[in-house]
Image (cartoon, rainbow, N blue to C red):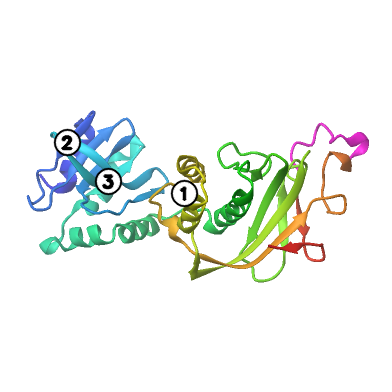
Amino acid sequence: MELLEEIRECFASTQDGARKIKTLPAEYPAIVIRNNEGYGVAIEFNDSRDVSEKFANSRLFTAILIIGGEEKKYLILSCMLDSLRYEFATVCAQFIEPGIDGIDRKNLIAQPLEWWKRWRELLGNAISNKEAYSVIAEMLVLDKLFINDKSVEWTAINAGSHDIEGDNNSYEVKSTIKRYGSTITISGQYQLQSKKKLQIYFCRFEKSKEGISVNDLVKELLSHGYDRDKLEKELYQLGYEKGSSIREVKYKVLEKRIYEVNDEFPKITNTSFKENHIPDSIIQITYTIDLDGLNYTVW
């Protein structure tokens, strides 16, 4: 039985658990796994690095598994859609194939993310990753505010009207990687409406190896007393779970501004309409504001 054929047979017959793949050389073992979270293949990964990548319905990640009474760390390639198991087996076969003198397996262990990027590009990445700079901007503002006000909360989990909320203030964070121009998009009629004092923090970035990353800001927030579990839950909600390579992407801060959303600031709210009421048939308002020419402070 060839490797691909064995993987397909295991996917079809394994209900819950793990099975060793017999067609591989003993020095390059791999297993087929199946549970309520999906199915896939796994190889031992004796490395301190954590991996956690997602694309469409597939994942590449590290996890501790207990198989045959032994607890080991594995690098796992899995899929959630059972209807694709025949096709997915082809990717799995290439993933665990050791190659001549084990060179493919050695390269995979050394650089698992390189393998992942090549296959994702080959299969067509229809789902684009959310750019890290927008998350970095929110974390920068959160860290600045949290140092002096422990009441502030990042609304990543509950998707509130504003990005950050404090006891006495609300904060909206906008960011860009455009070198010129300072336009922001307001999505929703409540984004610039608040019973508390409202400020807009605007950040301009450029991609740079000497910049800051999500993981850099995790360290900063934790050093200032932010709750680790809460922070990781918020990042997970945004698709930035621990071990994800996008958390290492760095951006340099070029500009940071603060705008007071007061009576002089251009905005569309309930008070913009007759009798201070948005017409019932209007369910969503999206508009663009040019910040150039408006008063701001630098932070």
Dot 2 falls on a residue whose secondary structure is strand
Per the rendering, the mark at residue 76 is: 3
**Residues marked 2 and 1 touching at CB (< 8 Å):** no
Which quarter shows the N terminus? top left
- Reading the image, the residue beneath label 1 is 240
List x then y, in percent, for residue 72: 19, 43
Which of the 4 image quadrants contains residue 12? top left
Which quarter shows the C terminus? bottom right
Residue 128 can be seen, yes or no: no
Query: Measured along the vertical axis of the image, is residue 214 above or below residue 206?
Result: above
Q: Which amino acid, mark 3?
A: Ile
Say which of 175 and 25 sits in front: 175
- Reading the image, the residue beneath label 2 is 67
Please give left or right for residue 59 compared with residue 132 in the image.
left
Badge 1: residue crowd in 10 Å (few <14, some 14–19, many ≥20): many
Q: Which amino acid, mark 2?
A: Ile
Specify start and end residues of the magenta stretch as a single range. 273-285
